[in-house]
Amino acid sequence: MQKEYVRKVEGGYRVGDTRVSLDSLVYLFHEGMSAESMVESYPSLTLEQVHGALAFYLRNQKEIDAYLAEGQRTSESLQRQSKRTNAELIAKLQRARRASHISS
């Protein structure tokens, strides 16, 4: 019986039955972090789950990399939109921050 180490939930990938995203492990993997260190960072995961999730990533790398790139593009777009929508509030907060530094 084959174990499922990664499941797709609401458009995102999760490791096993945890709330840990596959994204988190993939980014750490790209930074060169060991599987053992990932378990230390995410105590809800076992070493087996981390290795299984990384094997899933490597087996589906093209699809997962495209998913991550799309998520990055969406995040950047939302950030730009938020800056435009909240430009007045952001400017007001920056003025307040500068004023508090001057009076300190």
Image (cartoon, rainbow, N blue to C red):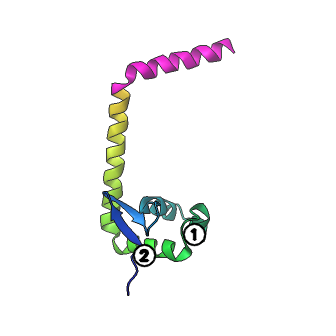
Tell me the quarter of the picture where residue 36 sits.
bottom right
Which residue does the image show at 51% across and 20% down from the upper left? Answer: 94
Asked if residue 60 is among those painted magenta in the image, a careful observer would answer: no
Residue wearing tag 2: 55
Q: Residue furthest right?
A: 104
Residue 104 in the image: state x and y as whole percent: 69, 15
Q: Which residue is mark 1?
A: 34
The disc placed on residue 1 is none
User: Residue 79's quadrant in the figure?
Assistant: top left
- Residue 8, position as x, y percentages in the image: 33, 64
Q: Residue at x 36, y 49 (%)?
A: 72
Pinpoint residue 103: horizontal percent, then vertical percent: 66, 12
Q: Is residue 28 left or right of residue 72?
A: right
Question: From mark 2 to mark 1, how far is it between C-alphas?
Answer: 14 Å
| Front-lying residue, 6 or 56 | 6
Image side of residue 44 versus residue 15, left or right: right
